[in-house]
Amino acid sequence: MVRSIMIVGVGGQGTLLASRILGSVLQSSGLQVKVSEVHGMSQRGGSVVTYIKYGDEVYSPVIEKGQADIIVSFELLEAARWLSYLKEGGELITNTQKISPMPVITGAAAYPENIEDKIRAAGVKLTAVDALSAAEKAGSVKAVNVVLMGVLSRLHDGFSQEQWEKAVEECVPPKAAEINRKAFELGRELV
């Protein structure tokens, strides 16, 4: 059986590090893993998406609309933007943080209201957490990505906490190890 996870966010939020952590956990379980990263306008605060497929035999990392088992979103508007990729019965994990895209910053558009309510109304299994506050508590706003991996580790069965902790330790820079350990634990506590 092949499963798929999308990690979506805005450039600079650490989606690529999160995908490395997840990929490390999956590989440590002996699964075949394929990852594809789409950077888009990441250096300008644009969308960044990573496709991760894993299972016994995986031929392509590409995830089509309606195929993602799980979407992990680092920002609310990105959760709404990629929602059509979630399969029926899939799960969406999102940070409640709002990052205004350029049209909102310039006044050409308004940030959509009630995104969480609209997602729930669509019948999606939604876990919305304040990962930014947890990251700040851990010691760095840059640790939102690891907080969300902590949330995912609690909701995604089949992988031990030790596998996740080892992956975090292996993937983050040594100077940031303690902050990221705290961020991971705080993420686990959010659910």
Image: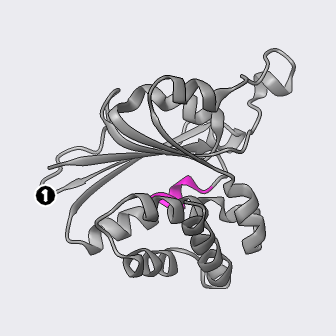
Question: Residue visible at 78% across and 66% down?
Answer: 136
Numbered-mark total: 1
How is the rendered protein coloured?
one colour
State the residue position of label 1: 56
- Residue 180 % position (x, y): 62, 75
- Residue 44 % position (x, y): 71, 39
- Residue 155 % position (x, y): 42, 58
View extreme (top): residue:
108
Near-viewer residue (89 or 171): 89
- Number of other residues with Cα within 10 Å of mark 1, as a class: few under 14, some 14 to 19, many 20 or more: few
Left or right of 157 in this view: 21: right
Quadrant position of residue 64: top left
Secondary structure under the numbered disc 1 in the rendered image: loop
Question: Residue visible at 13% across and 58% down?
Answer: 56
Left or right of 145 in this view: 93: left
Q: Please tell me whether residue 110 belongs to the stretch shown in magenta.
A: no
Near-viewer residue (55 or 20): 55
Task: Write down the region rendered in magenta.
Answer: 14-19
Left or right of 94 in this view: 70: left
- Residue 31 % position (x, y): 20, 64
Does 119 appear above or below 130?
above
Does 20 appear above or below 92?
below
Question: Residue visible at 17% across and 46% down?
Answer: 59
Q: Amino acid at mark 1?
A: Asp
Quadrant in which the C terminus is drawn? bottom right
Left or right of 157 in this view: 142: right
Question: Residue visible at 33% across and 63% down?
Answer: 157
Q: Please tell me whether residue 16 belongs to the stretch shown in magenta.
A: yes
Give the dominant element type of the magenta stretch: helix, strand or loop: helix
